[in-house]
Image (cartoon, grey):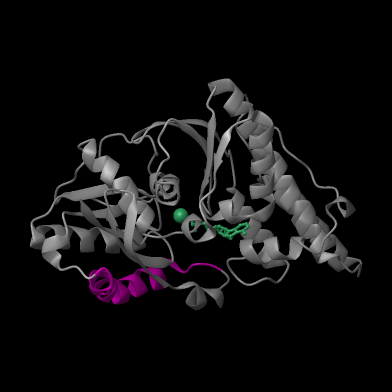
Amino acid sequence: MNILAVESSCDETAVAIVKDGRYVLTDCIASQVELHRVYGGVVPEIASRKHIEAIYALADQALENANLSRKDIDAIAVTYAPGLIGAVLVGVNFAKAAALAMNKPLIPVHHIRGHIAANYLAYPELKPPFLCLMVSGGHTMIVDVQDYTKMEILGTTLDDAAGESFDKVARVLGMPYPGGAALDKATKLGDETKYVLPRSKPGQNPLDMSFSGLKTATLNLIHHADQVGEKLDVNSLCAAFSAAISDTLVPRVVQAMKQTGRNKLTVAGGVAANSRIRADVLSAAKELGAEVYMPPLSLCGDNAAMIGSQAYYEFLAGNLADMSLNAYATKSILGEAL
Ligand code: KG4
Ligand code: ZN
C-alpha cells in the first residue's frame, strides 16, 4: 500500500511516499529554517505562507522521485495535530483536496505518533509493545506504546519541553535558531562539572518532569556572568546543561522500563538527536539488558516519512477521516475521536 504523506505542522514542508508503513520510496523536505532564523524562532504567519508556496511542487516532486503516478497512490495521510494552527491547516487542506480529487482514503495522523513511528522506518523488524522517550521542540513524554495505535503516557513535562529549553538557552548564548544542535556540538569541547545546574523533581508522578527551573537557573547564570563581566566557558555550560536535561530524562525512562517490564526502548523527536541523551539511553539500556532502537538523526527531526509510516497502522485500525477533517493546535496523543 503506497501512502502519500504530508507534514506541515511547523517550519518544514514535507511530502513522502511510504510503502506498507515501512519502506520510504521518497521523502521530500523543504525547510524554512533559514527564513525564520533572522527572527530567532518560527513566525507562524510566514510559516503558513511558505507551506502554501512549497506544498504542490513538493507533492509533484515526490511522485517524480518515486517514479510513480497518481494512480499508484492508495491513500493520502496528513498531520492534523498538534502544531502551529495555520501551518497544520495548509497540510490538512492540501490532503483533503488531494484525497477528494484522487478519490482515495484520507488518513489523519497525530504528529507525535508520527515521531514514534520513525522507529518503524529505521528498524523494519520493530514491533510494539515498547517504551518510547519522545522528546521534541514542543513535547517531552515517556510513552508506553502498547500497540501501533494504542498508547499510554507514563510521564510528561509539567512545563517546558526539553527542545524548547535547549533552544532558549542556545538563543541567549547567541547560537542561531534552532539552537539545540549547535548547543549539542559545543558540549564536545566542554567540562560538564564546571557548572552546577539543578535537576527538578516535580509533582506526584515520579515519571513527570520539569525543565523550567533548569532553564531559569541557566539563564540567570548567563545574565549574572554578563553583569559582573565574567567570561563564561560556553562549551562547559552547554555540557552541564545537556547533562542536566539527560539526567532528568534517562533515570525516569529506566524507572518506566522497570515499572512496565518492557524490554524494548526507543527514542523519537528532534531532541533524540542529542548526543548526550543518546549515549545515556544506550548505556541505560545496556544496564537493563533491554533492546534499544534509535532512529538516525535524519528521522528524528520533522519529516513526512514518519507520518506515512504511522498512517499505515492508523489505516489498518480504521482511523480514517472525511472532508470534515479539521486541524488542531493541541491534541492528545491518545487518539480520542476526531
Ligand atoms: O521534532 P522536531 O524536529 O520538531 C518538533 O516537533 O518540535 O524537534 C525540534 C527540536 C528543536 O528544539 C531543536 O533544537 C531540537 O529538536 N534538536 C536538538 C538537537 N537537534 C535538534 N536538541 C538537542 N540536541 C540536538 N542535537
Ligand atoms: Zn516534530
Specify the quadrant that holds the C terminus: top left
Q: Is residue 104 left or right of residue 3?
A: left
Closer-to-camera residue (142/69): 69
The relative height of residue 37 versus residue 194 in the rendered view (above or below) is below
Residue at 76% in and 59% down: 238
Our reading of the magenta stretch's main secondary structure is helix
State left or right for residue 293 relative to residue 12: right
Give the residue displayed 39% in from the left and 39% down from the top.
332
Magenta segment boundaries in residue numbering: 41-66
User: Where is residue 223, by image quadrant?
Assistant: bottom right
Can you give x and y, in whole percent of width and height, for residue 34 in the image? 51, 77
Q: Nearer the viewer, residue 42 or 315?
A: 315
Q: Position of residue 190 (x, y in %)?
A: 82, 61
Identity of the residue furthest to the front in this view:
125
Picture mark count? 0
The reply to whether residue 239 is visible in this rendering is: yes
| Res. 258 image quadrant | top right
Residue 80 shows in this picture: no
Q: Position of residue 247 (x, y in %)?
A: 72, 41
Quadrant containing ligand 1: bottom right
Q: Residue at x 28, y 64 (%)?
A: 90
Q: Nearer the viewer, residue 85 or 259?
A: 259
Indicate whether 133 appears above or below 262. below
Asked if the stretch drawn in magenta spans residue 316, the answer is no
Residue 64 in magenta stretch = yes
x%, y% of residue 60?
A: 23, 73
